[in-house]
Amino acid sequence: MPTLVKQVKQLSHSYVRKGGKTNRNQQIRRLIFVVSWIGEYYPRINQLEQIGKKQIIQFWKNHRDFANSTAYGYWLSIKLLWSFLNRPSVPPKPHTKAINND
């Protein structure tokens, strides 16, 4: 049974081959980080189809220290996973930090 990371690489193979290579490779690296974290935090998940909103919300809770731009980049990667899995909705968005310019 392939791991979550192998499944992401299989799904993203044709995606990475087209378009801007740097950005697409960066999105896949971020997506691999997310699914590997989910695989460690939720050891019973062994298929990408088992990843849902609950796991993504827990990922955001454990990674609140991301800058707004970094969190947005990870959200775009998770959104890409949602499109790979043909999910009808968008994944949960991260909470953004309030920036004080005092």
Image (cartoon, helix red, strand yellow):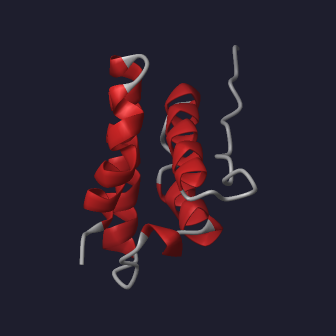
Examine the rendering and report whether any part of residue 100 can be seen.
Answer: yes
Which residue does the image show at 59% across and 49% down from the upper left?
A: 83
- Of the pair 6 and 93, the residue shown nearer to us: 6
Work out whether 101 lies above or below 68.
Answer: above
**Up/down of 45 relative to 3, above or below:** below
Q: Position of residue 92 (x, y in %)?
A: 68, 54
11 vs 51, left or right, is left
Q: Is residue 66 above or below residue 83?
A: above
Q: Residue at x 40, y 22 (%)?
A: 23
Q: Position of residue 93 (x, y in %)?
A: 68, 47
Relative depth, front residue between 85 and 69: 85
- Which x, y percent locates residue 2? 24, 71
Eyeballing the image, is 8 above or below 38? above
Can you see residue 26? no
> Which residue extends farthest bottom?
44
x, y percent for residue 80: 54, 43
21 and 102: which one is in front? 21
- Tell me if 10 is positioned left or right of 90 in this view: left
* Residue 46 quadrant: bottom left
